[in-house]
Image: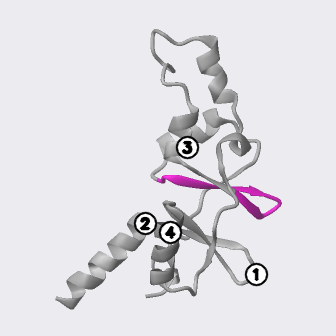
Amino acid sequence: MKLKSIMKTEVVTVDMDMPLRSISRMFKEKKFHHVVVVEDDDICGIISEWDVLRASSPFLDTPSEQNRDLATLRKRAHQIMSRHPVTITADADAEDAVGIILNKQISCLPVVSTDGELVGIVTWKDLLKAYSEQACAAV
């Protein structure tokens, strides 16, 4: 099974200086769990929902909120992203993606063309769903 049949082609990208407040809002408004951080069309990092939660103060929007809590929302994408993301090509086998995700303990892989252009993203959930559908079809 090739990744091009599993990956999502709608990839949300942000630039290095996007504020955490904007990134957090994007996650709340849309149904995705990862954004790819790019600079000059180069993939620089990945931000997951978990990264956003970890970087935000737990006191935001509570009666205990302080100025320092609001300051967490001024952090930038480059301050919270996972750097040097591992990428994979669309022609790679799903098995290869599973191996990378398990070995690197990551939750997604940006999918690139042979030229290194971002063409999609594949998550562990996408892979699990594809294998589950394949197993059900075989029964």
Task: Write down the residue under mark 1.
Answer: 115
Depth check: give the residue in front, 127 or 22: 127
* Horizontal side, residue 82 vs residue 41: left or right: left
Q: Report, in whole angstroms, how far the alpha carbon at label 1 lies from the one at label 2.
A: 24 Å
Which of the two discs, 1 and 2, labels the residue nearer the N terminus?
A: 1
What range is drawn magenta here? 32-44
Where in the figure is residue 13, as x and y percent of width and height? 66, 56
Task: Write down the residue under mark 3.
Answer: 51
Q: Amino acid at mark 2?
A: Trp
Task: Write down the residue under mark 2.
Answer: 124
Q: Is residue 25 visible?
A: no
Q: Amino acid at mark 3?
A: Asp
Task: Write down the residue under mark 4.
Answer: 103
Give the number of the mark in front: 1 or 2: 2
Where in the figure is residue 57, as x and y percent of width and height? 54, 25
* Horizontal side, residue 37 vs residue 130: left or right: right
Which of the two discs, 1 and 4, labels the residue nearer the N terminus?
A: 4
